[in-house]
Image (cartoon, rainbow, N blue to C red):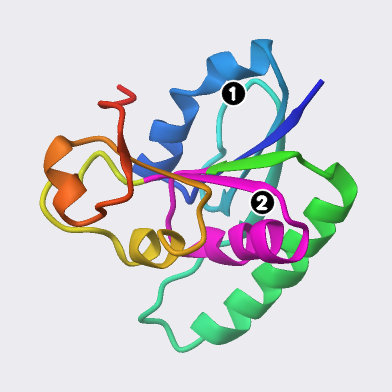
Amino acid sequence: MKKIALIASSGGHLEQLMMLRPLSAKFDTFTVTEKTGYSAGDTGNRVYYLKQVNRREWKFIPLMIANTFISLRILLREKPDAVICTGALATVPFCLLARRVFRKKLIFIESFAKVTDGTITGRLMYKHADLFIVQWESMLKVYPKAKYLGGIY
């Protein structure tokens, strides 16, 4: 059975990712998200936590370094075949390690909230993802090589 890492930062990104929970019936899945003041809730599978990151905080770089090591540990333990990500910034080390170091398939789903412009994480992951999905047809102007598959809600 194929193993899939489902990864997203907290809040709306995680909510979008949880719309893909039915994949757990077909694949061995685990979730990676940020550690915040509230629980990730019932994801239906194993959950791992990254440090919450804000690019405007002074500790941004140390937290991203920490997330790189946490991501490496998770990837070595779980050995996923593919990664599905809905962003945001805290997920970047995991996605880049999975794709560029471990040569795993990376699927990135741009945020449902983005209708006319891309997220910072989306613009970065567009260059690395094997499949880049947008949820609005208008986003094909921003990401011409993306696939429009409609909303996941």
Residue at left offset 41%, top offset 33% = 15
- 114, above or below 89, in the image: above
Residue 61: percent from left, percent from top: 55, 85
State left or right for residue 140 relative to residue 84.
left
Q: Is residue 124 left or right of residue 49?
A: left
Mark 1 sits on what residue?
42
Residue at the spot x=39%, y=63% of the render?
Answer: 121
Per the image, the residue denoted by label 2 is 49
Question: What residue is at 77 percent from the left and 26 percent from the top?
Answer: 2
Seen in the image, is 128 located left or right of residue 95?
A: left
Q: Secondary structure at mark 2?
A: strand
Are dots 1 and 2 in contact, CB under 8 Å?
Answer: no
| Sequence order check, earlier mark of 1 and 2 | 1
**Residue 70 falls in which quadrant of the image?**
bottom right
Q: Position of residue 148 (x, y in %)?
A: 27, 34
Q: Is residue 56 above or below residue 151?
A: below
Q: Looking at the picture, which amino acid does disc 2 mark?
A: Tyr
Magenta range: 85-109
